Amino acid sequence: MRRAIFPGSFDPITNGHLDIIARGSKLFDEIVIAVLNNPEKNPMFTVEERIDMLNKVLPAIETGNCVLTVEDFQGLLVEYAIKREIYAILRGIRAVSDYEYELQMALMNRRLEPRVETVFLMSGEAFSYISSRLVKQVFGLGGTIDGFVPSLVEAKMREKLGHTERMKYG
Ligand SMILES: Nc1ncnc2c1ncn2[C@@H]1O[C@H](COP(=O)(O)OP(=O)(O)OP(=O)(O)O)[C@@H](O)[C@H]1O
Ligand SMILES: [Mg+2]
């Protein structure tokens, strides 16, 4: 059984993440999508909301026989992976800018736990500039995010923004 863990904030899930998951599903029998509980990143969505969105949009992607599992996690990733008997970390690379950070993380994780390898996949060009941060920023300024996130996610973002606007303006 070849299993990988795909860690991230997924705040929210984008079509870039989905592209990496679809590509990864050709290499692994199971991918555990591990949603990082990171309150210090001041997230737009709670971990529960992020997991709920993931569970709703994942069935739409073609993954063959690969099983997708969604979990939340905090703490040391390699420790979590070993506990779950997973020996591959899946990460996506967009541009050179991702590489430096990802290399550092991969080498640190290898140092901490030599049994775990990091596997990098490149997303399709159409997704290569999409990040959750940029999507939130563009959306917050009123720009269209059509094609960057699943429509369910866009609807949830609209709900969220409407809610904060109401809070802000009474
Ligand atoms: N468009 C994309 N193409 C390739 N990899 C991606 C893409 N978007 C995210 N990833 C990868 O998915 C993994 C999880 O990333 P993360 O949750 O930080 O998403 P993100 O879009 O980078 O969010 P943020 O903007 O908040 O950092 C990382 O390995 C990241 O490089
Ligand atoms: Mg990121």
Image (spheres, rainbow, N blue to C red):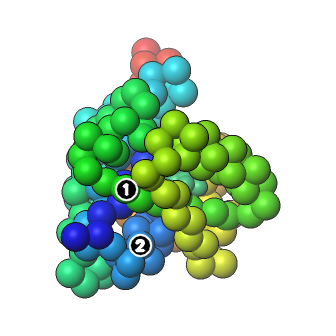
Residue 75 or residue 157, whichever sits in front: 75
> What kind of residue is marked 1?
Tyr
Which circle's residue, 2 or 1, is located before the other in the chain?
A: 2
- The CA distance from mark 2 to mark 1 is 14 Å
In this view, the residue farthest toward the right is 96
Please tell me in which quadrant of the rendered image residue 62 appears: bottom left
Viewer-side label of 2, 1 = 1
Instruction: Please identify the residue farthest to the top as the structure is shown.
Output: 170
Element at badge 1? loop
Query: Badge 2 is on which residue?
Result: 24
Q: Mark 1 points at which residue?
A: 87
Note whether 23 is above or below 161 in the view shown. Answer: below
Residue 155 is situated, as x and y percent measured from the top left of the image, at 36, 53
Left or right: 160, with 168 as reference point: left
Q: Is residue 87 left or right of residue 118?
A: left
Task: Answer yes or no: is residue 170 visible.
Answer: yes
Q: Evaluate whether residue 134 shows in this view.
A: no
Q: Residue at x 32, y 44 (%)?
A: 82
Residue shown at 49% from the left, 57% from the top: 117
**Quadrant holding the N terminus:** bottom left
